[in-house]
Amino acid sequence: VMAVITMRTFSIGDYVVFATMLAVSTIIGLYFAIRDRRKKNTEEYLLAGRSMSPFPVAFSLSVSFMSAVTVLGTPVEVYRFGTMYAWLMIGMLIALTVTAEVFIPVFYNMGLTTVYEYLEKRFNRAVRLTATFLFMVQTILYGGIVIYAPSLALSSVTGFNLWLSVVSTGAVCILYSCLGGLKGVIWTDALQAVVMLVGFISILIQGSIKLGGFANAWNLSKMGGRIEFANFDPDPRVRHSVWSLTVGGSVFVAGLYAVNQSQVQRYLSCRSAKDAKIAALLNWFGLVFLNSLAIMTGIVLYAYYKDCDPLTTGQVKMRDALLPVMVLEIFKDNPGMPGVFLSSIFSGSLSTVSTAITALASVTVHDFLKPIFPWTEKTYAYISMGLVIFYGLLLILFAYLASKLGAILQAAISILGLLGGPLVGLFSIGILFPFVNSIGALCGVVVGIAMNVWVFVGSKSYPPPAKFANALPLSCAVSSNLVANSSQAMTTTAFGQLINTTTLSPVLATTRPPVADLYAMSYMYYSAFGFCFVILVGVIVSLATG
């Protein structure tokens, strides 16, 4: 494999393929805008008239989880740490089964428009607005990163103009989400799912050909220690073990799929509760398929660079840029193919961002405006459109802030990733513990989030010892002096793949207080940790005040 990476750029053909994908997305939005133009109400616009069938909804659920950060980040996870990550699929299965059996029937049968409405009916308005507010802040910050991170990775290796890609992503998203409403978003997601599949499969085929077959790539990865599925170490400090990914992972995934407005609005758009359940479970197969392809791509990525890691030699500055670099190399004689990959990365972004702005418009209308202003449905449909544009522009602004305040924003995002578990806890005590009151619920959420933030901040002051990270060695025969750097512990926080911030842990403090062992807890357990405190505090406070 080439020792020197030349800065390859996209050809005209690649840009044509990419532009076509953006155009088709816009056309889908236009189609629904024209078709449903007579039905001007928020139910139609924000909930697709509760008329969707399970298949497009399932597709949509899968791709909005697979953001561009995941498309670029999952293969790199395998490249750095091996295939243990695959166990998260079992965590997903547990989370989605509970979502389908416990949460969906409650939310659907209450005829909710936003998931936070449930909290007002069960507790009071304060609890509802607290949850809505947390969701909004989280989604706005996350959306900005989802637009910015892939654009940055691409521009760093391909010379693809950074702000051109940020603004085009944002603009196309605003266009089809604004025009087509949730129906437009869901059908565009289905298109983007197909684009992502084609992207991964073409990389797998071409990469395997270059490496003499996938079996050979697998063997090379096995020799490099990348193929590992049996780490049953019960120590909660181990970054990825079967337990952290299935037990911790299930609460983490529930935070995204059970109680997050972005996904719940898709269940509510189905024809019946039964269809919504089917969509949630079909979505699991979609997630398994997409994640398996991403993991296999990681195996090919490792095998391709096993003799010389471009990060070690400093040819690639960003971890997220590894996959684009390989793609441009393996397809250097196939103009148009890197364009397919480009489209699949941006499909990841578009689906996540369009989901975010529709969900934000929905909660603004239903949780904040409707209870106060008695305007007509038609007025609200137009207001929803205006809000979609507003939030789209806001996310582009946050993408700009992400470029200026990288580290600060990433810290904010990681802390917000800690909200998922406590929110699952809040809805769970509402549904499962009839005696819990609103005081208990509020105290529980506050304590749950506080505990999570405390552990997270602690883990930054006392990073976990390298032995728990299981970072695997990378080599480069050419420049052995650089190899030493790559053996430092890596921690990749992937809250909902929120953002792959990778921090090199500094030389460990000589004296670690006993509490540092708590801080060393695997990031996969944060959600479950917060969740447990919400339940515990919520029950105790309710019994005390009941």
Image (cartoon, rainbow, N blue to C red):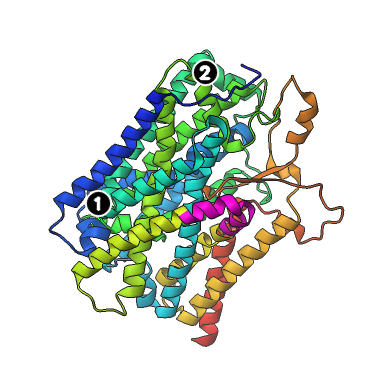
Res. 253 in view: no
In the picture, measured across the screen, residue 292 lies left or right of residue 78, that is left
- Residue at the far right in the pictured view: 510
Kind of residue sitting beneath label 1: Gly
Does 65 sit above or below residue 381? above
Q: Residue sitting at 67 percent across and 65 percent down?
A: 454
Between circles 2 and 1, the one closer to the viewer is 1
**Over which residues does the magenta segment extend?**
397-414
Where is residue 165 shown, x and y percent of the image? 45, 41
Q: Is 61 covered by the magenta stretch?
A: no
- Residue at the far left in the pictured view: 38
The residue nearer to you, when weighing 511 against 86, is 511
Kind of residue sitting beneath label 2: Ala
Q: How many angstroms separate mark 2 from mark 1 (CA)? A: 44 Å
- Residue where numbered disc 1 is placed: 180
Where is residue 223 shown, x and y percent of the image? 65, 22
Does 315 sit above or below residue 193? above
Q: Residue sitting at 55 percent across and 80 percent down?
A: 541
Where is residue 238 shown, x and y percent of the image? 67, 46
The residue nearer to you, when weighing 99 against 346, is 346
Q: Residue sitting at 55 percent across and 38 percent down?
A: 153
- Residue where numbered disc 2 is placed: 215
